[in-house]
Image (tube, rainbow, N blue to C red):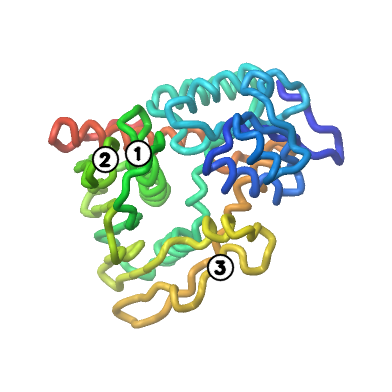
Amino acid sequence: MASAPAPGSVIRVGLLGYGLSGSRFHGPLVAAEPAFTLAAVASRRTDVVARDWPGVRTGTVDSLLADPDLQVLVVCTPNDSHASLAEQALRAGKHVVVEKPFTLDADEALRLDALAQERGLCLTVFHNRRWDGDFLTVRQLLSQGRLGTLYSLESHFDRFRPQVKVRWKEQDVPGGGSLWDLGAHLVDQAVQLFGLPESVVADLGRQRPGAQGTDWFHLVLRYGALRVLLHSGSVVHSPWPRFVLQGDRDAYVKHGLDAQEGQLEAGLRPGHPDFGSEPAAQHGRLLVSGETVPTAPGDYGQFYRQLAAAILHGAPVPVTAVSASQTVQVLQAALQSDAEGRRITLPSL
């Protein structure tokens, strides 16, 4: 078991990996939550860690796994290592945060959930875009019935990045490509809104010269009469709206990505009055009524806030392993659909 923090003390956190997710998201968000302290990082980039976090020690994965003073380990390594490192961390008695995607296989995700429950440990997955302001706004509109009966939701994550970069995310390796990277966000949001779809149809592409991994995808998720379209392209000069929802009473259109990633990169942190907010010019619109819909404040800080409550007080973890496994199940179905050129029907978990 993880050593319990003494009353009034902070929870000591170690990061396994220090790439983009560790440096841009987990480090700053852990540091912004008073219940936690960033104590150690497993990375060969010792100079970068020292620059970003003076006084935070660096080590190896094995040394952090064996450290009795660390209560939480955050797995922010390449996708194909998530499952094995999460299992090692749980067996070492640590509470575990896993960067999305949780695993590359839904059954493996459920096995990890069972292990965490057996050990009495918290296991959660960093699906941070559940706290995007635009997504929170969509949830609110649907819960209020503002659009009437919903018939379609279109969700885009487009970029203009015509040059292929030499990095694992863009290689043809297990867990590589934009479907596992950006698609994990879009699928997770759809599953949060509507649950597991009845079926999935997917078209995956490699469009850019030299592309090895998927850099274009289009998914259609079927929920009875409702269709959910999830799309991403890497050579998009003028991005499509982030969200388009069509109901029999009204429609909602929202442009622009959530501001929090850019704010974190610029040094803004949760707790700052501007964190998670966006300019009024970027607010979405209802097309029939003509009403501008203010975007709800985004709040990635909720993730570690809720994790602290789970560890200290037994509250629910921010993202359950079961819900994250459903996202993996849909991603697996999308890969199968593209490979076999057919619609894949999903069984319920």
Q: Quadrant of the N terminus?
A: top right
Q: Position of residue 23 (x, y in %)?
A: 59, 44
Quadrant of res 264: bottom right
What amino acid type should be assigned to the residue bearing mark 3?
Answer: Ser
Q: Nearer the viewer, residue 85 or 20?
A: 20
The first of marks 2 and 3 along the sequence is: 2
Q: Residue tagged by mark 1?
A: 170
Instruction: Say few, some or many: other residues with alpha carbon within 10 Å of mark 3 (under 14 / 14 to 19 / 20 or more).
Output: some
Element under label 3? loop
Q: Tag 2: residue type?
A: Ala
Q: From the top left corner, tell me how far across and down residue 9 is, in percent.
A: 84, 38
Is residue 27 shown left or right of residue 215?
right
Residue at the disc numbered 2: 211
10 Å neighbourhood of mark 2: few (<14), some, or many (≥20)? some
At 29% from the left edge and 79% from the top edge, which residue is drawn? 288
Q: Could you tell which of marks 1 and 2 lies nearer the N-terminus? A: 1
* Mark 1 in CB contact with mark 2 (< 8 angstroms): yes
Residue 55's place in the image compared with 106, above or below, is below
Q: Amino acid at mark 1?
A: Glu
Q: Is residue 328 left or right of residue 45?
A: left
Name the residue that disc number 3 marks. 277
Task: Locate residue 308, reporting x and y percent.
Answer: 70, 42
Q: CA distance from mark 2 to mark 3?
A: 35 Å
